[in-house]
Image (cartoon, rainbow, N blue to C red):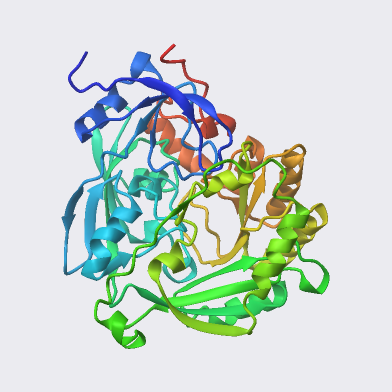
Amino acid sequence: MDSQSTSCVRKPMYGWGRYPIVEQALQRPEKSSAFRHAVHQPPQGSSVLARGGGRSYGDAALAPEGTVVLTERLNRFLSFNEETGVLRCEAGVSMQEILDVFVPRGWFPAVTPGTKFVTMGGAVAFDVHGKNHVRDGAFSQHLISFMLTLASGETVECSREKNADLFWATIGGMGLTGFISEVEFTLRPIQTAYIHSHGFKATNLDDAIALFTQYESQYQYSAAWIDCLASGRSLGRSIITFGNHAELSDLTAEQQADPLVIQSKRPFKVPVDFPSGILNRYTMSTFNHLYYNRQRQRSVESIVDYDSFFYPLDVIWDWNRIYGKGGFVQHQCAIPVENSKEALTKILQFSSKKGWGSFLAVLKRLGPQEGWLSFPIDGYTLALDIPVQPGLWKYLDQLDQIVVEHGGRIYLAKDARVGADVFRQMYPSFPKWLDVKSKVDPLNQFSSSLSERLNIVPTPQKVCP
């Protein structure tokens, strides 16, 4: 065996939604050289795919007929400029590792999604966005360059100036253009590790949109929990949370003594899969009622640590087990601003009538976004987590139809079932992306379950029999 080779094993794998579950061939290289070798010489000439933190919800990081290369041990920091905030690291570095090292030094990620367990390679591959998209854009807005290993075995630097087409094809490209090995991007300076949070109760969807419009220029971050089972005059009732990085003067005397360090939280682990059917219309309606009414006043301000503000679910390990052994899917759509109210009203009315809502429904305001396969649109995004159950695909197909009719799209990082035709309607720049993919990967060496489902690449050969 070549000294750079890593052994191939098979085990059941899945995304964060725990659907689908597939038997998967895996490699876990220890060094970048072995990482590149896995690309250039995959077992038996099969397809390959990189996988970072495994936080994409569906089948984007699965390749049951190919080999998945795990990047978790490629997590070295390579350089950091204290004056500009430019960080260069390997693709397996997680957001949590960045926070642990750089927040105490006065730096924070310019963009972060709702979990800190994503890797920087994954952040590029899905062009992640956060609560500040309307102000600061997605991760790509703060991305300087990355190193990409191609199907040929060559490793090239990609930026807005170098290999620009490959740069834009890889951003949001689901890992299908090559293996991202190093990433260079900017962090933002902060005075404290705290957030000045301002929460509002919105009585319905109209009120929620009005609050977003009124306050989005005053706050860097914003997101809403939305009751997707409410109906009538309460349709779309929400709790919207705005926030800015707190300054030193915002903190108590005790917090000012060590403003860049927060108290660590003891995680709680969900020990077992919840019984099937426990998340039903009645339990979720009860939860939504209690959650909405826990904030009694119209407006509440507070100072909270960044962990509580950005990553409230990360303290609950394996929270995906709440949805039962069958797993769940997330339907996250983005709708252009001019059509948002009409489309969101139809989706919420449909969800309320069906009773298949989500107790973790999230509404966010998005801004304009570059990128051929990047998800955000200047408008609003709504995310619904729904347990897998009979009839769900038909229900989600109906939601897709509403999204397409209003010029929207779904987030491929969260998807597990949308069809090829609908995907092409949602992403009109796909032909441009496919042209670059065809040039750098003519034999479709990089593929996934998602790319096969979307008819992007043919089914590759089996490996590890």
Task: Give how far across and how far down residue 241 sits, in percent.
Answer: 54, 74
Residue in the foreground of this view, choosing between 217 and 2: 2
**Residue most extreme to the top:** 465
Determine the residue positioned at 73% across, 48% down: 401
269 w.r.t. 284: above or below = above
Residue in the foreground of this view, choosing between 31 and 117: 117
Q: Is residue 312 left or right of residue 380?
A: left
Task: Give how far across and how far down residue 64 sits, in percent.
Answer: 49, 24
312 w.r.t. 160: above or below = below
Residue 278 visible within the image: yes
Q: How many marks?
A: 0
Q: Is residue 264 left or right of residue 336?
A: left
Task: Give how far across and how far down residue 249 sits, in percent.
Answer: 32, 88
Task: Give how far across and how far down residue 253 sits, in percent.
Answer: 30, 87
Determine the residue positioned at 31% across, 80% down: 255
Residue 380 visible within the image: no
Quick one: quadrant of the N terminus? top left
Determine the residue positioned at 59% across, 69% down: 224
Give residue 420's quadrant in the image.
top right
Determine the residue positioned at 70% across, 47% down: 278
Give residue 252's quadrant in the image.
bottom left
Residue in the foreground of this view, choosing between 349 and 312: 312
Quick one: quadrant of the C terminus? top left
